[in-house]
């Protein structure tokens, strides 16, 4: 199959970028989208040109490293599919494709299709963990977790932190990512002692990173490769309001645990 590609090229973060046209002939339909970009890069290198920079790692839809906007859709047209798992057979011979990086204030462009997603790491560092004393590992069955709760926590933990939710949101909001990371800890008994201080710390960090506000467009849910539900955002908002009430109660503004 023969394709025409319009790819965003930007030499560095502060440089001016633009869409550049590339012809991609003889593309095997069984290639993944990233393999197609590999082929284009091989031709560019052979011609003495700078290859297109894009991010990837496992190429199995697990790590969340990959991610580009294809014709205005984060990760491309196939639902519940990361860019690395999108195959060229889902396009037609002769198609013209526009390929861009994530577009969001919180994800500044590093080069070409690569963006800096360090803001996600800083949100996690603000509270996306459980404090526990070191020592011997506890018996696995000493703290029973109900099957329904465990399954809900796993649903939230499906988030791979790719950033498609931010890229697709008209406001550039990171609420789905933050809410999923809060939910998978807040549902489990191990996460209860720090549940409310955690939500305040992570939400406030999210806002400091320059992400937009959630307006319930639910575009985030539509493009999530792991189909993480937007209902976690409601849970996060509810916990945040509870935390504000609790943390403002009394002169000492106790932060060690929730309102019970």
Image (tube, helix red, strand yellow):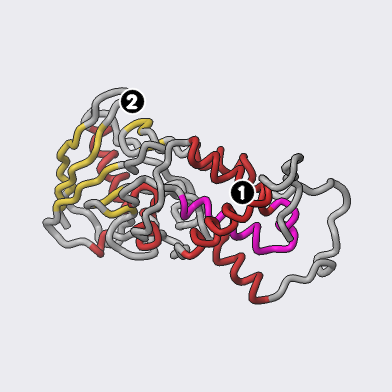
Question: Residue at label 1?
Answer: 244
Upstream in sequence: badge 2 or badge 1: 2
Residue 192 lies within the magenta run: yes
User: Which label lies toward us, 2 or 1?
Assistant: 1
**Numbered badge on residue 127:** none
Rendering coords of residue 213 (x, y %): 40, 47
User: Which residue range is magenta in the image?
Assistant: 175-194
Q: Residue at x 35, y 47 (%)?
A: 167
Q: Residue at x 47, y 36 (%)?
A: 209
The N terminus - image quarter:
bottom left
Rendering coords of residue 94 (x, y %): 11, 56
Left or right side of 184 for 194: right
Q: Are marks 2 and 1 in contact (CB under 8 Å)?
A: no
Question: Residue at label 2?
Answer: 12
Hey, which residue is sitting farthest top in the picture? 14
Residue 168 lies within the magenta run: no
Main SS of the magenta part reads helix
Under circle 2, the secondary element is loop
């Amino acid at each position: 199959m023969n394709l025409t590609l319009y790819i965003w090229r930007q030499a560095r973060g502060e440089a001016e970028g633009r869409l550049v046209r590339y012809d991609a002939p003889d593309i095997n339909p069984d290639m993944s989208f990233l393999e197609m970009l590999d082929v284009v890069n091989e031709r560019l290198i052979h011609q003495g040109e700078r290859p297109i920079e894009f991010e990837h790692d496992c190429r199995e839809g697990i790590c969340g490293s990959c991610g580009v906007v294809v014709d205005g859709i984060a990760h491309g047209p196939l639902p519940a599919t990361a860019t690395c798992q999108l195959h060229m057979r889902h396009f037609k011979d002769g198609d013209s494709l526009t390929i861009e990086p994530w577009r969001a204030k919180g994800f500044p462009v590093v080069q070409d299709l690569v963006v800096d997603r360090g803001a996600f790491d800083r949100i996690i560092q603000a509270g996306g963990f459980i404090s526990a004393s070191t020592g011997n590992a506890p018996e696995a069955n000493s703290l029973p977790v109900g099957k329904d709760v465990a399954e809900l926590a796993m649903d939230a933990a499906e988030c791979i932190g790719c950033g498609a939710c931010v890229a697709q949101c008209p406001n550039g909001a990171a609420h789905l990512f933050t809410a999923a990371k809060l939910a998978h800890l807040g549902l489990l008994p191990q996460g209860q002692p720090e549940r409310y201080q955690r939500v305040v710390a992570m939400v406030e960090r999210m806002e400091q990173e320059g992400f937009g506000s959630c307006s319930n467009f639910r575009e985030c849910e539509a493009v999530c490769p792991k189909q993480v539900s937007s209902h976690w955002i409601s849970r996060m908002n509810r916990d945040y309001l509870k935390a504000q009430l609790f943390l403002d109660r009394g002169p000492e503004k106790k932060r060690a645990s929730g309102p019970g």
